Image (spheres, helix red, strand yellow):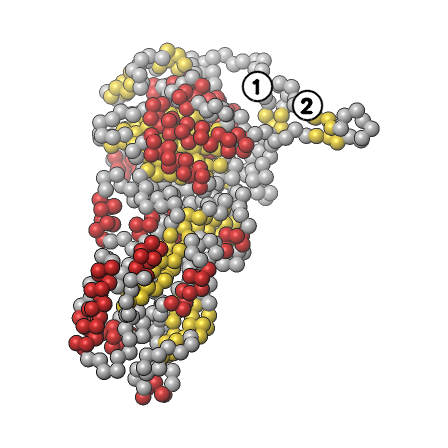
Amino acid sequence: MIRPVFSLLLGALGALPVSAQEIAALPNAASTAGAAPTDASILTRRDARTITLAIPAPRGLIVDRNGEPFAQNRVSWQLALQYQQFEKADRDFVVRWGRERLEKAKALHPGVWEFTDDQLWEHYRHRRWLPLYITTHLGREQKDKLESQLSGGLVLHPVYQRYYPEGELAAHIVGYTGSVGKLPTGPINFNEPLWEETEGRDGFELIFNKELTGQPGMKKLLFDETGRKFPEEQVKRPRPGGSVVTTLNMKWQKQAEKSLRQHTRLGAFVLVDVYTGEVLVMASRPSFDLNRFIPGISDKDFEALKADSTSPLTARAYQARYSPGSTFKSFVAISALDNGTVTEKTLIDCPGTLVVGGHPFRNHNRRAAGSINVTQAIASSNNIWFGKVGMRMGANTFLNTARRFGFGEKTGLDLVGESGGLVPTNEWMMQNERRTFKDGDAFNMSIGQGSLVVTPLQVAQGMAGIANGGVLPKLHLVHQVQDPYGRVIRQAVPERRKWLGVDEEAIETVKKGMRQVVTGGTGRSAGLSFTELCGKTGTAQWTSNRNLAWFAGFLPYDQPRYAFAAVYEGRRGENPSGGRHATPIVKSFFEPLKDDFKEILAPAPKAVAIVDEGEPASAIVVEEPEEGVMRALPVEPLEIAPEPDDEDAPEIPRALPVDPEDEHPDEEEVWDED
């Protein structure tokens, strides 16, 4: 649920970790905005000034779906040198006066900046009515420690500061800000900012910079020729920026990042609502503390982050390009079932090794499996089965199906640097490999290897398409954008991204196989205590000497609600597997949150009919239908439906048989070895 809009927008000021008195004092405490002579008397009284100040507005909030802040504002302080108006001041006197106070400041705080004599003199000449900031932003503890020790000429000026209360949580999505530019030097300009203004540099801070940026206020100060300050006039109050309400669930995001820390050094996890397309969790490991960028990160520290071998600035959930490994087999199976290459009953002989074009392809356990069908092949993740099916279909066939599930293109979320992955085409093969697809390519890509690459976000989106049963939902990462008054100026509306056009029975067959993966196959260690999970494990060669492990799927099996994808990056020389390394990430995410999910996934209350008081019972409970009876699927309020004028859209089935008996089973089809 979303908190009332006014409670969110009040956070732009009211939710700041600062007292009302400090907020009120901000416009009165500092002065760095411009000045311009406004009457003839100032031309003859050179030390008098009328100064017009621009008061920077606080940025709007970035919050989760429940109003918990990812990004907000707080007050910090800067130590400053405040010159007096000297009656007879020459350069040596002004410089000496400034140096004495700088030395006192250095004794109190080690972070005082260095200034040249020229800088001290020029500031006095042109800007002595305004403070000369000599430190970066100081926290409350530092401020309290320094305040009682300050001598004449040294002051603490409060300023707004961006603050990320959760540090590195969802850092790649939230982003960070940076200074618009250093404060001016030289003669004062009209309407200069009171302190350095900020702008978005990455993530939502950048994408929604216009919406998050407020409107500055304005005030005027008047000084006489002795430096005495007259009562100031506030012409305009600053207006805070709007707020961005994400679809993320902060509690779940924290648990996802905790699970990644516990079970992998490098990896990612994504959770998507199958019906609405809302991205509820998107975590990448490692991350970085956003507060390191506030008020600004040094060049040395930024270069160290970029040079870090673990690439903490890379959002693995949506920027990293991975081979999908065996998670891709689910989509190959759907393609084969949909176009009739196989049926649910088709049996294919699967030796331990198959030579194609002189190259040996092996099953992951190198053992022959005999003749198995599609659900068995999915449950055991049999490479030979999928390689044979992929070669018979041809690479273009199952790759076209993959594109319908969203692979090979960006999801369209509000993200910086999202990768679209790669699903090769004939043109790409000719340009890069100087040939068209061959059987070896079809075999390789049918098991999720080769030039095919995806992101964890794309895999979760594809799994949502399988779970949804016919529609690829359009993903959303922003629920609302609100203006400073709490009015909604942008609202996410659940909608389809595309119709899959895939036979429903094909999807149901694959879902059965994915259920078997968890109940007794390669992903059995991922079984949950509170619901029936469906998934597909995967292992893939990523680089020449690094492998990775996958586990992706949805839950529950009956009427799926959430789709997920987890990836584990192995160390150099490590041979991870989906069942041993990726499934623990998923299980350790869901199990601690089981109360949340049980409540959400609980069936709707049974219908109750109220009867007259004269009846023996006060209420009659409507019984559940018997086994085999057609049950109506619940239509969620946010369920994706075709547009009314879309004549080509297939009809959405509203009822499915529960465990129907197959009175006339087809004869099993057995493929010949050729």
Decide if residue 72 is in sight here: yes
The amino acid type of the residue labelled 1 equals: Asp
Q: Which residue occupies 70% across, 30% down?
A: 608
Expressed as whole percent of the image width and height from the top left, the position of residue 232 reads: 42, 75
Callout count: 2
The amino acid type of the residue labelled 2 equals: Glu
Q: Which residue is mark 1?
A: 659
Vertical placement of 623 versus 543: above or below?
above
Say which of 380 and 9 sits in front. 9
Name the residue at the front extreme: 148
Expressed as whole percent of the image width and height from the top left, the position of residue 361 reads: 28, 20
Expressed as whole percent of the image width and height from the top left, the position of residue 49 reads: 34, 80
Name the residue at the right extreme: 614
Question: Is disc 1 placed on a helix, strand or loop?
Answer: loop
Crowdedness near tag 2: few (<14), some (14–19) or many (≥20) residues, C-alpha within 10 Å: few
Q: Is residue 612 left or right of residue 421?
A: right
Q: Which residue is mark 2?
A: 623
Gap in angstroms between the C-alphas marked 1 and 2:
18 Å
Vertical placement of 495 versus 624: above or below?
below
Expressed as whole percent of the image width and height from the top left, the position of residue 141 reads: 33, 54
Say which of 38 and 95 sits in front. 95
Comparing marks 1 and 2, which lies closer to the viewer? Answer: 2
Q: Which residue occupies 56% across, 40% down?
A: 638
